[in-house]
Image: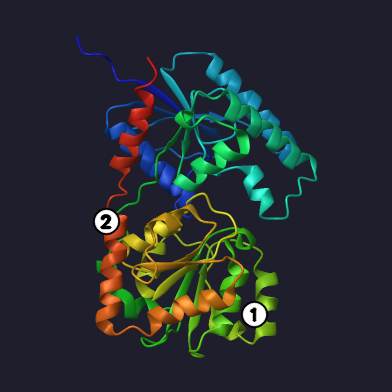
Amino acid sequence: MSRPPRKLLVIARPYSYHGGVERATAELLRALADHGYDVHLLSVRQQPALAGVVVHRLALPSLPASVRLLVFVAATRRFVARGGWDLVQSHERTLCQQVYRAGEGCHRGYLATRGGSARGLYHRLVLALERRIFAGTPAIAAIARRGKREIETLYGVASEKVSVVYNGVDLERFHPRNRAARISVREEIGLGAAAWTTLFVGSGFERKGLITAVEALAALGDRDSRLVVIGRGHRATHEAHAARLGVAERIVWLGPRPDVERWYAAADVAVLPTRYEPFGNVHLEALASGLPIVTSTEAGGSELIQDGVNGAVVDPRDAKALAVAVDRFREMSPAGREAASAAARRAAEPFTYAAQVAGFSRIYGNFP
């Protein structure tokens, strides 16, 4: 008699089609189900349904962040304690899993990019919880080699306990053929076909380094260039800075978009000078779209970048270096840009959801 499919419970935040992390989680869940796992998702009340996945919803009241953190940990623990799971995998900071996917990296590492301050109850609680997770979870899945090194270094976790399982990307949705509609997409926001356009995609503008992208726009040699911004963040602060630099009229703010693949197709280069990024689905989405990306030394996604070939890697606070890297692509011949686009696409092609599932399956094989 064949063994029934392993009953897998995944603990994760609600997925949406505006956020890269949530969107990628939904695709991973689908891929796990397609691979034959009996997939269950534990999330909060507003979680929508997903075909092939059994959704369990936690009804949590509206609470301050610190209290909500503790209540979520307790609620997930109670739910898991009811039993019936072959394996529990958490994408959130919980204490009831066999596998922890460190998609947000290390909070300790993130705080270091802000000067190391852990003032405030919330940060202290997250750090305490993080220590327990890395000490007590049998298997850790980092999402890039950089994250694996960070976990091992900051928390003394044994190397054999930490695997690298890269994110996947929808290679059909994010595809160079979308560029066929490039001109019509640009016309929606009043961009001419010839306007050199950089694209910033990301929510949490401060951490993702939007301030550096704005300063790089001011430093570009092409004064007709534009910056398109997609995502959520403190827009007013960045608008004021852009006004001081004289580039406010050259920035297009689109907010969160469900059709982000169209904007990758409309841009000439993506920029993500992030201050802290364990990986960043933007890297894979841009590359899969055939769009070179200039990212930062603090991004796990920089592992995919060949300087001057499919993008560049710069210091996240060095706006001049970012501008120089962007200008290099602007100054390429049409043949050079086509070669860069093809190189970008090739870099993304190994990163399928099937490959991500295979990586997790290797980890699951260590559990009876």
State left or right for residue 18 relative to residue 194: right
List x then y, in percent, for residue 285: 38, 59
Q: Is residue 190 visible?
A: yes
* Quadrant occupied by the C terminus: top left
Closest to the camera, between mark 2 and mark 1, is 1
Residue located 25% across and 14% down the image? 3
Q: Is residue 31 above or below residue 208?
A: above
Residue 55, quarter of picture: top left
- At label 1, counting other C-alpha atoms closer than 10 Å, the crowd grade (few under 14, some 14-19, many 20 or more) is many
Nearer to the camera, 150 or 97: 150
Residue located 56% across and 31% down the image? 157
Residue located 59% across and 65% down the image? 209
How far is disc 2 from disc 1 in space, using C-alphas? 35 Å
State left or right for residue 210 relative to residue 222: right
Q: Earlier in the sequence, mark 2 or mark 1?
A: 2
- At label 2, counting other C-alpha atoms closer than 10 Å, the crowd grade (few under 14, some 14-19, many 20 or more) is few
Nearer to the camera, 353 or 119: 119
Q: Is residue 144 visible?
A: no
**Residue at label 1?**
242
Nearer to the camera, 286 or 47: 286
State left or right for residue 89 relative to residue 130: left
Residue 107, quarter of picture: top right
Q: Is residue 306 above or below residue 128?
A: below
| Residue at the outermost top position | 1
Mark linked to residue 75: none
* Quadrant occupied by the N terminus: top left
Colour logic: rainbow
Local secondary structure at mark 2? loop
Confirm or deny contact between disc 2 and disc 1 (CB under 8 A).
Answer: no
List x then y, in percent, for residue 208: 57, 61
**Residue at label 2?**
172
Local secondary structure at mark 1? helix
